[in-house]
Structure formats: C-alpha cells, structure tokens
Image (tube, rainbow, N blue to C red):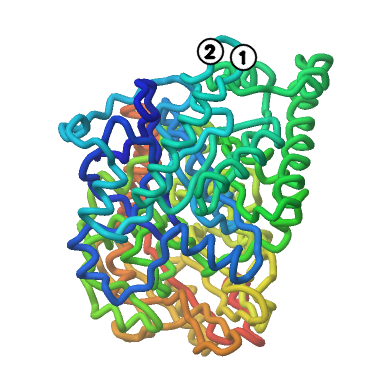
Amino acid sequence: MMAPKRVDDTHKKTNFKLVLPLHSIIAPFIGSDEGINFILIYEYTPAERERERARERMKVIEKIREASEVEGKVVFSFEFFPPKTEDGIENMLERMDRMVSHNPSFCDITWGAGGSTADLTLDISNKMQNMVKHMRAKYGDYFGITVAGYPEAHPDMIQGEGRATLEAYQNDLAYLKRKVDAGADLIITQLFYDTDVFLKFVNDCRQVGITCPIVPGIMPINNYRGFLRMTGFCKTRVPFDIMAALEPIKDNEEAVKAYGIHLGTEMCKKILAHGIKTLHLYTLNMEKSALAILKNLGLIDESRISRSLPWRRPTNIFRVKEDVRPIFWANRPKSYISRTLGWEQYPRGRWGDSGNPSYGALTDHQFMRPRSRNKKLQEEWVVPLNSIEDIHERFMNYCLGKLKSSPWSELDGLQPESKIINEQLGQVNLKGFLTINSQPAVNGEKSVSPSVGWGGPAGYVYQKAYLEFFCSKDKLNVLVEKCMTLPSLTYIAVNKEGKCVSNVGLNDVNAVTWGVFPAKEIIQPTVVDPASFMVWKDEAFEIWTKGWGCLFPDGDPSSKILQQVECSYYLVSLVDNDYIHGDLFAAFKDI
C-alpha cells in the first residue's frame, strides 16, 4: 500500500505521515510531491464516495470546528509510529485501542520519524510543484488536508546550535502561507518546548494572513536520552530551566517521566489559556505520559470510559453503522471481521437486516497470531497433558485469572463482565464443561457501569446470562435432561461433524444484549444466531489443534489428547432467557 508523503519544503529530509480520522479507511494513495509539506486526511476513494454518498462523514477540520468553535470544547489527537518488530506492532495496536477509547478527534501514524528513512517512492513525486494545489484543483474539497508548521522554522533553516535568521524564518512562514492558500485546512506544528515560541508563531501566522486552526504538537519527555536525541535532530530550542530541571534526575527514568508529565501539563495549560482549543500529542507509542497530561487537564476521566457497543467498532467507514453481531466471536473480533469483509451490508438495528450473508471461508489466516501472543500461549498452555483432567485445570485457571491468554481468545484475560462470574466459571470447568465465552445476567444496570456498561450516559443495559463451552456427549446428555426442568434455558449443541442437538429452531435469533437510551430505539448489539453458530463451530473446533495442539512438539502425546477432545466433544451455546430471576449455573448442579 502506498502512503501519503510528507516532504519538508525544498529540503531532502523526509517524513511520512498518515492521519486517520476515527472510522476512516485506508485506501491506495494517488501521488505525492517534493517541495510540499503536508499530511493527508484520508476520507474515501472516488468509487467509494459514490457507494457511500448517503453515509455520514466528517473531516478532521469539521470535527475540530464543531467541538472547539461551536461547542467550546478542547479537542486532542494522538500520533503514533510503526515499530520495527512484530511484537512492537502488536503492543502499539493494543495501546491504540486503549487510547482511542478516550475519544481523540483523530489519530495519525508517521513514517520516518526521528531521522529514519522510509523507502516509499511514487513515480509522480517529482512531477508536481505543489501537492496541496494539485489536490484542490483535481478533487476540490473532497479531501481534508493538514500541513506541518515549524514554530522555529524548518530544521534545515537553523544553522548550528543557534536559531534561524529572521530572513529564513520569514521565508519559512511565507511558504507556509502559500500552502494554506493552496487549500490546506489546518496546521499541526513540529514539537517545541518553549511555549512562548509557539505563541509567537501563532501570532506571526495571523499577521501574515493565515487564519486556519494551528494545532500545537506536544511531545512528552519520557526519557532523557530520547529527549536529547529528538531535540537534537529537530534542532528544537530547549529553555535553560528545563535542562536545569532534568540534569539532576537524568539517570532516573521514572523521575524524568514524572517531570515530563508536569512540563507537558503546564505547557498545555498556558496554550489553552490563550484561547487555543486543540492539542496534538506525539506519543512515541507510549500511552501513560500522554494520558496523564490529558487527565491533569481534566480532558479525560479514566473511570468513565464508555464503550459505544459491547464490542469494539472497527475503524472502517463501511462498518461505521454496524451495531449487531453474533456473540460467538466476542473474544475473536479480528477473525469475525476477516470472515465478514465481503459483505455488501452490515447488520444495523436487527440481525435480520444482514440479509443472511455468507461468511468467508475458514483459512489459516484466522489462526495466525502475533509472536508475542504465541509466546504467552507457549508459557501458559504448553504443559504436559496426561489426562482430560489436565485440560480441565487449564480452563479453570484461565477463568480464575491465573492465566492471561487463551487459544480461543485474541484478547488479554477475561473481560470485565466475565470476572463477575469467574468463581462459578471455575467450578463449571472443573466439572468438564470447558468454557470459551460467557456473560452474566444484567437487569437494568446504568450504561456507565465500568464492568457491563456501554452506549454512553443516561441509559440502561440488559443482558441474558450466556455460556459457551465444550463438553463430552455423556455430560451433554445429562445437561439436556436438566434443561427440560428449567424452561428458561435454550441451547444449541453441535459436534465437529455437524450433528446438532437443540431446543430452538435454525432461524430463532435470540437477542442476548440490549440497551435503552434517551431518544433512541432499543439497541440490541449481541445475538445468538443458530445459523452463525454452525459457521463458528468449525473455527472453534479447529482451535483445539491449530490454536493449541500446534504449540506442542511433533509427536507429543499431549497433542493426541487434544485431538481426541476435538473429535469427540460437543460445542454448546446455552442461554438463560430469564434475566431477572434466572440462574444459568443451576443447570450444572449435581453434575
């Protein structure tokens, strides 16, 4: 995939940056230009625009204006860079997931940060004199475009350890003016540590007629050596008092980080006091300092993070309105997305709105894992299995929080709502009902509940108790007998070959999670769909060997035990439809 290219004016040191509005998609880029410094805010390709004409969309500049100018709010954004290792990429994506939960206005990813190079070239790059002008002439206001600004002038304008000459600074400012006049929507600045320099830059921009928003780029100090390296590369002026404060603590990383949070907070306070309501944080893929600064400013409250749905929405414009999913892939969202990529429409409002689309075929892709997760599974699940009871113990320990990984989950540990019932889950697993998915019953909890809440404030959420597990045919027979005496329980059980035992019809879709919110229809984001369960069962069974057994050395007897379970057990989906007085775990008593 080609990436939008950010080239620093007429200079040859190159950065690459892609800005991703929330719910954006990444699509092939058309070209780039040496002699222009820009960030592309990607919206749609022309073909996608025709398909999605009726869909809601907002450019970054529109988000900023609506929040800061209309609503008077302070908005913030994050910048990341791609790590060089697979483990680093996985860690970055997990951090991004956590940080996006704080609702930044957008996130961007930069290539070539800190002096590294990115070997991304485009044939067209030397043929255009002004990329912003070209894009506006060819595409009108179709794209949102952000350009970079340098409060101290571009580093190549700064000679030695000093400052840019007045002439060089004014030339840099004039060039920025030409980029804005060509059609840029807003400016994000290079890092700085002298707030007065930034405020002067803003004033100078206004004096030459630049009226668009100017977003300050804030880079928290995380460690002393990295700080020196970055400021040296960017030729950023560092006030004497900052260096004096860092000198005695430079070998104490925690003290440096704490000072960096304090400094970043004070810089932002001063900037906000001058009426600027936008902040862009260069995270260097480290979340704690950036979030601590925002918390100090009162812009985020970690205790009130609210999920928009019980599952995380993908950052894909085609799925922005999707709000219903089968519960079976709750712990494997990436797999679900990969198996539904070909759908023309995504369910909204009711599962039936999906038009019964076909799932993508099960391939090796669904069983691929990042190296870091494979390592964790090796540590926790590759133990000698001498009997089926050893398997019971692995599952039980996972439910009790003693293990943080599971072959059936892409996530880390049990989800908060399952921890409510972890003791009961542990007992069920010890009896040989090997659980891979669960949720407790909820009757009208506030939607801001930290464990089961979703959908925003002022609502109430409900859910039926749900349990999904593997068990032997003998245990299934006993459970079916128990269910006959508990009329609120519905179940679907199927083995690897497709033999099914159930007390519901194939088309009986059961909503197991729903929410009631002001001025909205009832939202039911999670369902038990028997047809989808028959698709999911193939993936669930194959994990016994492709997700767990494959971790053992060839010929290890543990793999044979896992294969026997895969071939002889049933996968069961169990729902207690009485979410007020029901007791799903009563079905397992005396078994």
Q: Quadrant of residue 257?
A: top right
- In the picture of the structure, the residue carrying the numbered disc 2 is 159
Residue 110 is left or right of residue 359, and the answer is right
Where residue 196 appears, as percent x and y from the top left, is 71, 36
What residue is rendered at 50% in x and 79% in y? Answer: 512
Tag 2 and tag 1, C-beta contact below 8 Å: yes
What residue is rendered at 41% in x and 27% in y? Answer: 112
Give the farthest residue toward the top: 160
Of 90 and 431, which appears nearest the observer?
90
Name the secondary structure under disc 1.
loop
Q: How many marks?
A: 2
Of 529 and 499, which appears nearest the observer?
529
In the picture, which quadrant includes the N terminus? Answer: top left
Above-or-below relation of 222 to 500: above
- In the picture of the structure, the residue carrying the numbered disc 1 is 162
Q: Amino acid at mark 1?
A: Gly
Of 151 and 245, which appears nearest the observer?
151
Where residue 134 appears, as percent x and y from the top left, is 24, 47
Q: Mark 2: give few (<14), some (14-19) or many (20+) Cα within 10 Å.
A: few
Above-or-below relation of 317 to 119: below
Name the secondary structure under disc 2.
loop
Q: Mark 1: give few (<14), some (14-19) or many (20+) Cα within 10 Å.
A: few
Q: Amino acid at mark 2?
A: Gln
Where residue 33 appears, as percent x and y from the top left, is 26, 35
Give the Cα separation between the discs numbered 2 and 1: 6 Å
